[in-house]
Image (tube, rainbow, N blue to C red):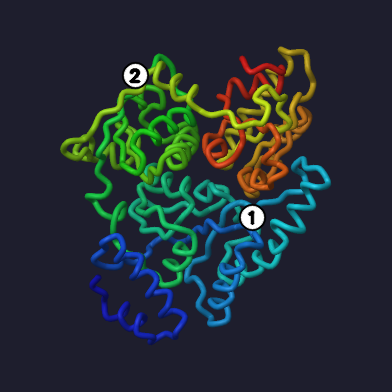
């Protein structure tokens, strides 16, 4: 890797031993992926994936303390993934004991470290930092140092920023140094599509299911998706962005997609069209039968596949303000149709603290509360990592949560039917 004089001086220790180690780590990271140079991080804010004070992460806390003690902190303020614990989310005594005394006993200490390192504010705990209410929304062409997979794929695809699928800790190191190695999705060539996905469904495909199908097919490659604009339109309005948030998270978790292009919709596809497609790109056709095949392929890993669900999580990644409003309408309508007043399964809708504050200002908040649905800032995945919670029959329409935990996937319509009517069919 060829370094500038400034970068080489940092590596040689001109700004201290700790910053030199940070730069050395980034150089080794770049060398591993064939990067020829470092490029500046240009976004206003950073985003960190490590938000949880998990006791087994002591080496991370020690590393963070070294940075703090040496005064080597981020030049950018940053948001961070969701908190792992919320007392308002249903949990029994033993589950709560494991959360607070064993798993996340160092949460307060770690959040104190994050504040010293450059945390934006107390509301900056979310996996959807790019939402307007949160304020960490990169500009097109910005170079980022992020690691959260669902945020990386959204920033690359919907916003047109540039970021690799970095690991945790690399994210803050790139922010501290102000540089990241240039390879992969930071390059024009790395952003070209090597898969063409043709959407031939008879109705608007479920975002999480379509994302899952594409992610499992193309893995880490870049897909160019044709035909989805027929269902989403050609403008990135609230509805389209919300759909792509959930779609992208599924591609990134069920596969390893860091960037997708959607014909006539996402910024690079609208500008460059099929010029983004690399020579020899493979083709994947998605129709109704293919989505049904993918859905039926998901394993059910509950001890009792016929168990009655004890909890429902919605919002992985975190829900948008429009989603909270729309789901309020849907839950109310479905309950009325069934002759029920409250949801039949304990149900948690998760969103960022900033989005929840805006939601509380609307009439929808009281209406949703009246249905029995709980709103929370929690990370459902971190909740399910509690071994006692992992044994529970939990349902979700998040393909990310399904992939990483024991939660069972249902479509949005099936979830709605279960929580309001007691059946899996709408």
Q: Nearer the viewer, mark 1 or mark 2?
A: 2
Res 76 visible = yes
- The residue at which mark 2 appears reads as 200
Identify the image quadrant of the N terminus: bottom left
Direction from residue 63 to residue 335 in the image, left or right: right
Residue 304, image x, y percentages: 68, 27
Label 1 with label 2: CB-CB less than 8 Å: no
Q: Categorize mark 1 by other alpha carbons within 10 Å: few (<14), some (14-19), many (20+).
A: some
User: In the displayed image of the protein, which residue is found farthest to the left?
Assistant: 279
- The residue at which mark 1 appears reads as 123
Residue 70, image x, y percentages: 53, 82
Identify the image quadrant of the C terminus: top right
Q: In terms of image quadrants, where is residue 62?
A: bottom right
Please name the residue shown 70% across and 56% down the image: 103
Q: In terms of image quadrants, where is residue 409?
A: top right
Residue 52 circle label: none
Direction from residue 346 to residue 9 in the image, left or right: left
User: In the displayed image of the protein, which residue is found farthest to the right?
Assistant: 93
Residue 401, image x, y percentages: 57, 39
N-terminal label among 1 and 2: 1
Q: Considering only vertical position in the picture, is 187 above or below 333?
A: below
Res 320 visible = no
Most foreground residue, 269 or 60: 60
Helix, strand or loop under label 1: loop
Please name the residue shown 60% across and 57% down the image: 51
Please name the residue shown 66% across and 37% down the image: 349
Q: Considering only vertical position in the picture, is 201 above or below 247?
A: above
Residue 122, image x, y percentages: 65, 59
Helix, strand or loop under label 2: loop
């Amino acid at each position: 890797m060829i370094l500038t004089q400034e970068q080489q001086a940092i590596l040689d220790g001109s700004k201290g031993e700790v910053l030199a180690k940070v730069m050395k780590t980034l150089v080794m990271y770049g060398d591993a992926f064939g990067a020829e140079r470092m490029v500046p991080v240009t976004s206003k804010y950073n985003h960190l994936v490590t938000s949880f004070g998990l006791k087994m992460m002591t080496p991370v806390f020690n590393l963070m303390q070294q940075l703090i003690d040496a005064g080597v902190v981020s030049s950018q303020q940053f948001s961070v993934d969701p908190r792992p614990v919320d007392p308002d989310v249903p949990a029994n005594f033993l589950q709560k004991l494991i959360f607070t005394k064993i798993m996340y006993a160092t949460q307060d200490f770690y959040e104190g470290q994050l504040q010293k390192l450059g945390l934006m504010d107390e509301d900056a705990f979310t996996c959807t930092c790019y939402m307007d209410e949160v304020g960490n929304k990169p500009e097109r062409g910005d170079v980022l140092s992020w690691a959260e997979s669902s945020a990386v794929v959204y920033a690359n695809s919907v916003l047109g920023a540039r970021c690799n699928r970095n690991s945790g800790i690399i994210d803050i190191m790139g922010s501290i140094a102000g540089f990241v190695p240039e390879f992969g999705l930071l390059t024009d060539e790395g952003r070209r599509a090597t898969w063409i996905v043709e959407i031939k469904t008879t109705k608007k495909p479920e975002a999480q299911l379509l994302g899952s199908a594409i992610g499992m097919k193309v893995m880490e490659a870049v897909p160019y998706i044709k035909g989805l604009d027929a269902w989403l339109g050609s403008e990135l309005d609230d509805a389209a962005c919300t759909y792509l948030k959930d779609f992208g998270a599924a591609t990134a978790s069920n596969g390893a997609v860091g960037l997708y292009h959607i014909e006539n919709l996402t910024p690079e596809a609208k500008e460059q069209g099929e010029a983004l497609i690399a020579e020899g790109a493979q083709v994947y056709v998605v129709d109704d039968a293919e989505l049904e095949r993918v859905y039926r392929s998901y394993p059910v890993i509950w001890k009792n596949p016929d168990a009655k669900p004890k909890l429902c999580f919605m919002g992985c990644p975190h829900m948008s303000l429009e989603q909270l409003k729309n789901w309020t309408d849907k839950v109310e309508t479905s309950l009325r149709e069934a002759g029920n007043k409250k949801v039949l399964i304990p149900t948690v809708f998760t969103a960022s603290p900033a989005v929840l504050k805006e939601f509380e200002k609307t009439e929808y908040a009281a209406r949703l509360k009246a249905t029995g649905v709980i709103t929370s800032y929690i990370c459902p995945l971190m909740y399910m990592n509690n071994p006692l919670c992992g044994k529970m029959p939990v349902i979700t329409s998040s393909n990310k949560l399904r992939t990483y935990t024991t939660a069972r996937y249902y479509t949005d319509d099936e979830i709605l039917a279960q929580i309001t009517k007691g059946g899996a069919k709408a």
